[in-house]
Image: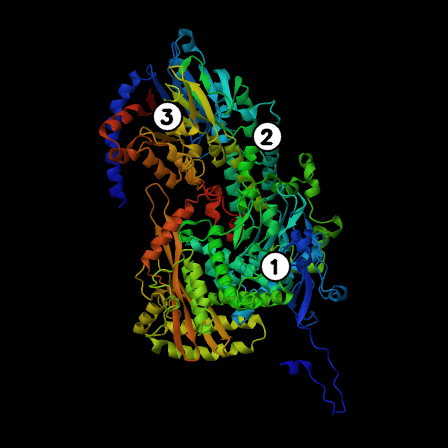
């Protein structure tokens, strides 16, 4: 059986490669975006996001990078990241109008960074040398980074503390325990999840990692604080393109509320204080947690029998047992309480994804043009908050038009799929199902082999199916070498002319997948 | 019985025997009826502190088993270690005269010894309810040992850790045969009921303790019910545990009378009896109790409103707790219908025939009578729910099967349904769209498992042999003896079966839903013992053996032996190209109900091992499970089958993406 399948696959591949070879010659000529065309490149640096958006402008195009990162993996590493960022740099040089700048380190008009997760920022560390030399004009980050915003800073502080607590808890969990493989597996799973924060269990509590990289990125240039309550943002020198900021939600209380919806068992538990006594227990005598010390002990000190005393008490030695091989060893609960670390890590993960920068780029006529949707890794709370947003923009006739997030979604022709296609970063009813444009194309920045190593379902099959339906086959995955995987889908679902124009607009290179959108 | 115990002195004799004090029937222990939060309210404080009556266990003495500090008794052992605090807490000695003299320690949140007393009182009450319904001693799930071949070891006591976790969670660990309770600071969202940031102890909640104990008891009867292979499996475990906790509320007379008076006899209105874990629910930021069988607080209005059952509920709800809640609501609904029919006459008498009560408070006598009817109805419903466990298939339970089990159990014990209990159950299930597969009509006759007619020639000799063995059960004094004998009979039964002729086996297999030929993919085999050859035969397991001797309300007695047989297949399913193959264990078999009086096989409740349609449903379900639907599923789903299924479950599942 398998031989047969490979055979058909390889013939298919051959055919599509031929088609691609033809296209490649064309592409070289049309590399620079045409007068009214946006070029989107999704890089193949690994499991993470790295995009280069290029908007037409005279004398030279406007280049915007959206995120730059990849999770650690055995399948790739620093060289791949440097190749990707190097390729971006080369593009910047190639397309510079000014002769002398062609020799320079490249000018990047904007870097938009959605959130502080390793798979979105690692490139600023891994390819730091290139960024050091590059001329970055502006850094776009969420309003939550604003130093003067007290609420934002408070959130940040709480977040840091929790992150520290997870690390401390991880240090208490044994890697291997005789007769209890479960604990080690669990620890491994948590540390893989924590990979998003750039530190793994094996690395110990790697100080700095993500934070240092984030700080470095912030210092690359002057900052734009993106706020959904503000008017759409302009792209310098490009009049008919504007950027609507969708998230993170403007009100910090709103973020918290979304995290602690009170109607269900679980979400209520995510409310911040519930972790307090757990954190107090893992904190030891760390001063950062001294405010929690009151909550550390459930009873008055006088009731407590410390381990040393219990170890010599008949009742506890007989019933609990403290030695290896004791009769009661299998029933001990020394580490079960530390499972809470996984909860805390999940909580932090969704918190970060919820405070993530999400935006929609509108091309052409205000209130009517095509839209590119970049939600970062926004999760439920973030998506839901968009429903409350409206903007008033002036169209070319001078009329004021009201724009809602719903409008923007309906006009989306490109959807950068959130969180590598995971189950919880694309809303159904208030998300994908609102993207009704017949031109919709989805791009999933994913590295399936890495995800599989971790046993993560990226892309999540039901979502993947829904995307295929919605975009009628036009789902581009960063780790695909060519169109062969979706060939039969697009053949079936698109009209010949749609298919032709889609294939024409799509290019696969070793380092990236490119898709061009005329407007 | 009485006279034996009391040893009446014979006055005629010269040598007068020393008059011994009668042994107490109960040990009285004070505790919370619900949880500490209700003691902070003036209207509920009076009823929240109750006295549990726990079966008396003698004090342990040299060479004599009995109740020891811990408490450590016949069924449970409380060991109070709080690893997060690095603290052990002194075990309470319930035989201490000072404690005995005041019905146990007074309820207190700040005294760990009281916590130990509370978990002891509630677990023992729950165990007692089980034993009463089943008519036999409760056994914990045995411990699987893998050193030197697979064997099952008797577990005498369930281990209880009142302060094992620092989180809003409590769970039963099938691996450790232990209950782990957590504590956590209350959230700041509704400070009127508790001290914000104050510590909430899950081991002080009657409902949580009863719930977790029920998980353990259910696991002791049906250890394969913890395997998730249907969206009903986890939901069933949850629902069942909730049902036990709920109906135990009705065994507290003071609480019952208070709530009957407050609701003027209408138990379908908002009341404490239908709610579970008030303090826990509110402390984690809920508006009300963790779960409510009758209604819930509308988020928009903040007002309580009754549930509105819909036929599509069963079809559309997937999250285990929400799905479990459907079953709980159905059972509660059946209870309400039974209660209403039982008190109809009382209400008419009290309202000069109109059935409409006058305004104002109810007469205390009426309250007492209503309370006694409510308590009776609740006990009947709870008993029916527990007894039904004997009539469930050994694997792969769904709610429809459970309804059939309830009906069958009830038909067997109470042939004449003059009070319409069965209709009440059927009606309540039907209103929520819970329909068993392959049933023609929703009547008690067709819902009852079909009686086995043929093949009795195989079972008669079997029953004859088993009867002798089963009779011994009556005389056992310790649960260990029960366990050992059951194991022994199981092995013998196994041997008897395999020595049968080919044709008989084929027929037996057909009835029992297993196979004796290698005609199924992945079927596990075993070497023929003693044959010396390498010949392999399909493996099957006598999973459990349970004697059921009960007496019905009209004096009908029941003498049955319940045998669970399980067979397993290792399934590997290819997925889409690029995906890993899905591998899991598919089990089938049956629960055989053998009537030891007539020596006939009465029911064979099967999940056929050869049922490919069921296998396909499993595959789909597993696929869906892998595709999780929650962050927890994404990152931790591959650990789900690992040691602690209830730990993750009780930490619950993320809300679904809308």
The span from disc 1 to disc 3 (Cα, nearest Å) is 69 Å
Q: Are marks 2 and 1 on the same chain?
A: no
Task: Specify the subunit that label 2 lies on.
Answer: A
Name the residue tied to disc 3: A512
- Pinpoint residue A355: horizontal percent, then vertical percent: 52, 31
Nearest the eye: B262 or B180: B262
Task: Specify the subunit that label 1 lies on.
Answer: B
- Pinpoint residue A202: horizontal percent, then vertical percent: 54, 38
Tell me the element at label 2.
helix
Q: Residue furthest top?
A: A99
Residue B138 seen in render:
no
The span from disc 2 to disc 1 (Cα, nearest Å) is 48 Å
Nearest the eye: B19 or B408: B408
Tell me the element at label 1.
helix
Q: Residues within 10 Å of mark 1 (few under 14, many from 20)?
A: many
Q: Which mark is residue A156?
A: 2
Nearest the eye: A217 or B558: B558
- Pinpoint residue A519: horizontal percent, then vertical percent: 33, 19
Q: How many marks?
A: 3
Closer mark to the observer between disc 2 and disc 1: 1
């Amino acid at each position: 059986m398998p031989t047969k399948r490979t055979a058909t696959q390889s013939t298919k591949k051959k055919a599509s490669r031929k088609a691609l070879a033809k296209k490649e010659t064309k592409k070289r000529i049309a590399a620079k975006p045409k007068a009214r065309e946006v070029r989107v490149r999704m890089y193949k640096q690994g499991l993470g996001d790295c995009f280069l958006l290029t908007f037409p402008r005279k004398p030279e195009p406007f280049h915007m990078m959206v995120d730059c990162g990849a999770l650690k993996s055995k399948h790739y590493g620093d060289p791949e990241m440097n190749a990707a960022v190097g390729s971006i740099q080369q593009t910047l040089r190639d397309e510079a109008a000014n002769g002398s700048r062609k020799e320079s380190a490249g000018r990047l008009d904007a870097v938009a960074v959605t959130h502080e997760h390793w798979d979105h920022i690692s490139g600023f560390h891994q390819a730091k040398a290139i960024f050091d030399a590059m001329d970055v004009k502006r850094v776009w980050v969420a309003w939550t980074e604003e130093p003067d915003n007290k609420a934002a800073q408070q959130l940040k502080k709480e977040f840091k503390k929790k992150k520290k607590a997870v690390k401390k808890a991880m240090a208490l969990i044994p890697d291997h325990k005789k007769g209890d493989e479960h604990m080690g597996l669990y620890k491994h799973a948590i540390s893989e999840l924590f990979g998003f924060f750039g530190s793994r269990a094996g690395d110990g509590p790697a100080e700095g990692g993500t934070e240092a990289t984030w700080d470095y990125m912030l210092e690359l240039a002057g900052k734009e604080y993106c706020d959904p309550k503000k008017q759409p943002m302009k792209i310098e020198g490009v009049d008919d393109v504007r950027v609507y900021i969708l998230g993170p939600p403007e009100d910090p209380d709103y973020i918290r509320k979304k995290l602690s919806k009170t109607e269900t068992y679980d979400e209520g538990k995510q409310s911040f204080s519930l972790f307090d006594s757990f954190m107090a227990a893992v904190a030891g005598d760390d001063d950062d947690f001294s405010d929690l010390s009151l909550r550390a002990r459930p009873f008055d000190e006088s009731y407590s029998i410390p381990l040393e005393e219990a170890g010599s008490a008949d009742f506890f030695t007989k019933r609990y047992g403290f030695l290896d091989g004791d009769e009661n060893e299998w029933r001990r609960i020394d580490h079960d309480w530390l499972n809470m670390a996984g909860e805390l890590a999940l909580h932090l993960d969704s918190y970060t994804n919820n405070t993530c920068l999400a935006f929609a780029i509108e091309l052409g006529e205000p209130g009517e043009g095509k839209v590119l949707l970049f939600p970062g890794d926004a999760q439920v709370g973030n998506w839901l908050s968009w429903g409350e947003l409206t903007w008033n923009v002036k169209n070319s006739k001078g009329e004021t038009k009201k724009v809602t997030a719903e409008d923007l979604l309906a006009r989306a022709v490109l959807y950068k799929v959130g969180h590598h296609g995971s189950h919880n970063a694309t809303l159904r009813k208030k998300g994908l199902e609102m993207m009704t444009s017949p031109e919709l194309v989805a791009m999933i920045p994913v590295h399936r082999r890495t995800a599989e190593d971790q046993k993560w379902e990226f892309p999540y099959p039901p979502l993947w199916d829904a995307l295929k339906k919605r975009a009628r086959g036009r789902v581009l995955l960063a780790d695909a070498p060519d169109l062969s995987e979706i060939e039969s889908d697009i053949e079936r679902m698109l009209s010949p002319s749609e298919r032709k124009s889609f294939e024409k607009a799509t290019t696969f290179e070793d380092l990236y997948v490119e898709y061009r959108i005329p407007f | 019985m009485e006279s034996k115990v009391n040893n009446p002195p014979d006055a005629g004799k010269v040598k007068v025997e020393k008059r011994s004090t009668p042994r107490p029937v109960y040990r009285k222990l004070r505790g919370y009826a619900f949880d500490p939060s209700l003691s902070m309210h003036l209207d509920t404080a009076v009823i929240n502190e109750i006295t549990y009556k726990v079966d008396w266990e003698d004090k342990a003495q040299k060479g004599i088993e009995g109740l020891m500090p811990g408490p450590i008794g016949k069924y449970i052992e409380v060991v109070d270690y709080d690893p997060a605090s690095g603290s052990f807490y002194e075990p309470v000695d319930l035989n201490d005269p000072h404690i005995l003299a005041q019905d146990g320690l007074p309820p207190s949140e700040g005294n760990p010894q009281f916590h130990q007393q509370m978990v002891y009182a509630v677990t023992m009450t729950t165990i007692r309810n089980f034993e009463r319904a089943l008519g036999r001693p409760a056994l914990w799930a045995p411990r699987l040992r893998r050193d030197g071949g697979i064997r099952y070891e008797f577990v005498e006591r369930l281990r209880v850790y009142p302060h094992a976790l620092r989180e809003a969670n409590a769970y039963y660990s099938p691996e450790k045969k232990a209950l782990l309770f957590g504590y956590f600071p209350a959230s700041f969202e509704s400070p009127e009921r508790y001290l914000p940031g104050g510590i909430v102890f899950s081991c002080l909640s009657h409902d949580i303790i009863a719930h977790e104990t029920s998980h353990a008891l259910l696991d002791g009867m049906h250890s394969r019910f913890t395997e998730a292979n249907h969206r009903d499996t986890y939901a069933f475990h949850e629902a069942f545990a909730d049902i036990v906790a709920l109906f135990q509320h009705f065994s507290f007379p003071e609480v019952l009378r208070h709530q009957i008076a407050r609701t003027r006899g209408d138990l379908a209105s908002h009341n404490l009896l239908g709610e579970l874990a008030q303090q826990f629910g509110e402390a984690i930021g809920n508006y009300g109790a963790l779960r409510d069988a009758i209604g819930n607080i509308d988020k928009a209005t903040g007002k309580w409103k009754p549930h509105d059952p819909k036929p599509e509920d069963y079809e559309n709800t997937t999250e285990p707790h929400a799905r479990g809640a459907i079953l709980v609501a159905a059972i509660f609904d059946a209870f309400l219908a039974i209660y209403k029919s039982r008190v109809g006459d009382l209400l008419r008498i009290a309202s000069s025939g109109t059935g409409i009560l006058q305004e104002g408070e109810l007469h205390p006598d009426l309250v007492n009578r209503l309370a006694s009817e409510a308590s009776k109805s609740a006990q009947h419903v709870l008993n029916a729910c527990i007894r039904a466990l004997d009539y469930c298939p050994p694997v792969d339970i769904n709610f429809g099967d459970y309804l059939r089990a309830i009906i069958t159990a009830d038909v067997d014990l109470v042939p004449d349904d003059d009070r319409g209990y069965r209709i009440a159950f059927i009606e309540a299930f039907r209103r929520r769209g819970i329909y068993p597969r392959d049933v023609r009509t929703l009547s008690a006759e067709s819902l009852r498992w079909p009686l086995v007619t043929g093949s009795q020639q195989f079972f008669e000799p079997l029953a004859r042999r088993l009867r002798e063995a089963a009779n011994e059960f009556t005389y056992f004094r310790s649960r260990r003896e029960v366990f050992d004998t059951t194991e022994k009979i199981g092995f013998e039964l196994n041997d008897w079966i395999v020595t049968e002729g080919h044709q008989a086996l084929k027929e037996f297999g057909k009835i029992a839903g297993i196979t004796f030929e290698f005609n199924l993919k992945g079927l596990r085999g075993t070497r023929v013992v003693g044959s010396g050859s390498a010949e392999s035969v399909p493996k099957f397991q006598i999973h459990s053996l349970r004697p059921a001797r009960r007496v019905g309300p009209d004096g009908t007695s029941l003498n049955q032996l319940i045998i669970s047989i399980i067979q397993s297949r290792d399934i590997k399913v290819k997925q889409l190209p690029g995906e890993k193959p899905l591998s899991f264990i598919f089990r089938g078999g049956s629960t055989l109900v053998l009537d030891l009086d007539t020596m006939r096989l009465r029911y064979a409740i099967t999940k056929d091992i050869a049922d490919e349609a069921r296998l396909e449903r499993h595959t789909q379900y597993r696929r869906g499970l892998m595709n999780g639907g929650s962050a927890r599923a994404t990152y931790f789903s591959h650990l789900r089958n690992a040691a602690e299924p209830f730990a993750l479950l009780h930490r619950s599942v993320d809300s679904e993406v809308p």
